[in-house]
Image: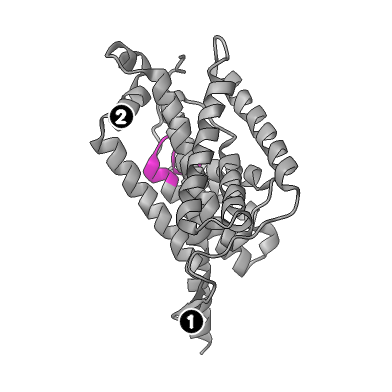
Amino acid sequence: MEKITLASQLLQYLITGLTVGSVYAMVAVGFNIIYNVTEIINFAQGEFVMLGGLIMVFFHVAMGLSLILAFPATVILVTLVGMLLDRLAIRPIRQPSVLTLIIATIAASIIIKGAAMFIWGKDPYDLPAFSGRNPITFLGAVIQPQYLWVIGFLVFVVIALSIFFDRTIIGKAMSACADNADAASLVGINVKQMILLSFALSAGIGAVAGITMTPISLMEYDRGVMLAIKGFGAAILGGLGSFPGAILGGLIIGSIESFGAGLISSGYKDAFALLVLMAVLFFKPSGIFGDIEISKIKRF
């Protein structure tokens, strides 16, 4: 009986870890989309997740829009915020360096967080679960239906991005900019438009992550910072710029947090993931799927 109970607990920790890790993976994918085109680390990525959750609460709970209408409306609005970030904070900078642009994203993160606090206040907000809150029992583990939505949307994002980058002209143009922005510009690709699109895509994915996680863990104005740290850690662990690495890194960090909190102490769950991240980077600084080569800084 003890073995069955232990197995059920371990399965519970795994399911919870994969759910949390799926959110981290989506944040990490957002980091990589912008990094691959611009080599910028967008530290406002976590704010896209926060806005996704809070705006969805506004549309679905406060305004009473149905889930089918509120979901795309939220994604579109957060996508516009991402595009404004490029237009107002990135593009106007003259003779940009990567460091200057990263500082600009940090400043944008602070401004967005302050605006969210002004609009929504400091209280956490809940969002009704998409399929109710009646748990599903599987091999002794309790699964909230929302967990399946989070994992399912990660799978959807991965499939959609794979098709976009492999099968569409715009996706291939973005990939060309990631390989060599100067060469892409010479063959007629509008690099600035590709950068704008990268911010739009990363914001949209961040919104999806925020919408799906809010029914599980609530959402408040200052959640974006920690989500950005975890997502960035996942991107680094998997290999900055690698989409498979971002997904694997997110799932690993989420699982480590869950098992660490359940088996040792919930007070140190953040430390467990960071220790493993440091250990991996000590033996393989480029991350699990990262390239050891350091490319030249792009200017645009």
Measuring from the top left, give residue 57's x and y in whole percent. 60, 54
What's the magenta region?
Answer: 235-246
Per the model, the C-alpha gap separating discs 2 and 1 is 46 Å
Q: Secondary structure at mark 1?
A: loop
- 200 or 237: nearer the eye? 200
Measuring from the top left, give residue 299's x and y in whole percent. 46, 14
Q: Is residue 285 visible?
A: no
Characterize the magenta stretch by its predominant secondary structure. helix
Compared across the picture, whether 103 is left or right of 208 comes to: right
As for residue 242 lying within the magenta part, the answer is: yes
Q: Secondary structure at mark 2?
A: helix
Q: How many marks?
A: 2
Q: According to the image, label 2 marks what residue?
A: 170
* Res 126 quadrant in image: bottom right
As for residue 251 lying within the magenta part, the answer is: no
Measuring from the top left, give residue 53's x and y in whole percent. 58, 51
Q: According to the image, label 1 marks what residue?
A: 140
Q: Say what amino acid the circle numbered 1 marks.
A: Gly
